[in-house]
Image: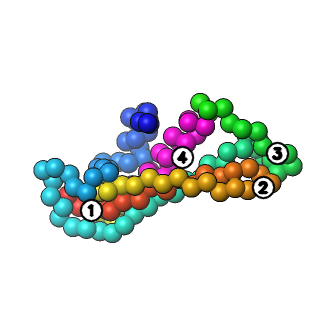
Amino acid sequence: MVARVPERQVQQNAGCIIIVTTAEIEGRPVLDYLGIVSGEATMDLSRRRGRIAHLARPGKLAPAKLEQRLSEARCRAVAEMARNARELGATAILAVDLRYTSVQQPDTGDLIIVTASGTAVSV
């Protein structure tokens, strides 16, 4: 599945950093390896919010809403990873991997953790 993210949001989140899932960028040699960077975002699968969220068993999200919220969480995780890479002086992130972890919370519903990680480099 390809996430549809508004170009303005991508530019704000990632800046001028190149983000790829491959180990190299064709025609752009790596000048310096700066380290591993990551970003995380959490998503509560409960439809209920606020103080009463823990009092009732949460309802399930509609598939379209779930897809939208997963996409938003993925964008937040990638944006945080890009911010961390820029702080190291990186111009690109190679070998980006996205992971999804589900955590069951009996009282409040499930939580999904989205993690983006990769290698910050200068190209």
Q: Is residue 81 magenta?
A: yes
Q: Is residue 80 visible?
A: no
Residue found at x 15% / y 58%: 29
Marks 1 and 3, Cα distance to the nearest angstrom? 45 Å
Q: Which residues are magenta?
A: 66-83
Q: Residue at x 61, y 54 (%)?
A: 102
x and y, in percent, of residue 34 in the image: 29, 68
Tell which circle, 4 or 3, labels the residue nearer the N-terminal end: 3
The residue tagged 3 is: 57
Q: Earlier in the sequence, mark 4 or mark 2?
A: 4
Determine which of the numbered discs, if any, sits on residue 73 in the image.
Answer: 4
Alpha carbon distance from label 4 to label 3: 23 Å
Q: Which residue is mark 1?
A: 121
Identify the image quadrant of residue 36: bottom left
Q: 59 above or below 115?
A: above
Of circles 2 and 1, which is in front?
A: 2
Where's residue 61, x and y in %? Answer: 68, 36
Q: Is residue 60 left or right of residue 100?
A: right
Q: Amino acid at mark 1?
A: Val
Does 58 sit left or right of 111 as displayed?
A: right
Nearer mark to the viewer, of 1 and 3: 3
Return the x and y of residue 45 as percentages of the image width and height: 67, 45
Q: Amino acid at mark 3?
A: Arg
| Mark 1 vs 4, N-terminal side | 4
Q: Which residue is mark 2?
A: 106
Residue 50 screen position, x and y as percent: 78, 47
State the image quarter where residue 94 is shown. Answer: bottom left
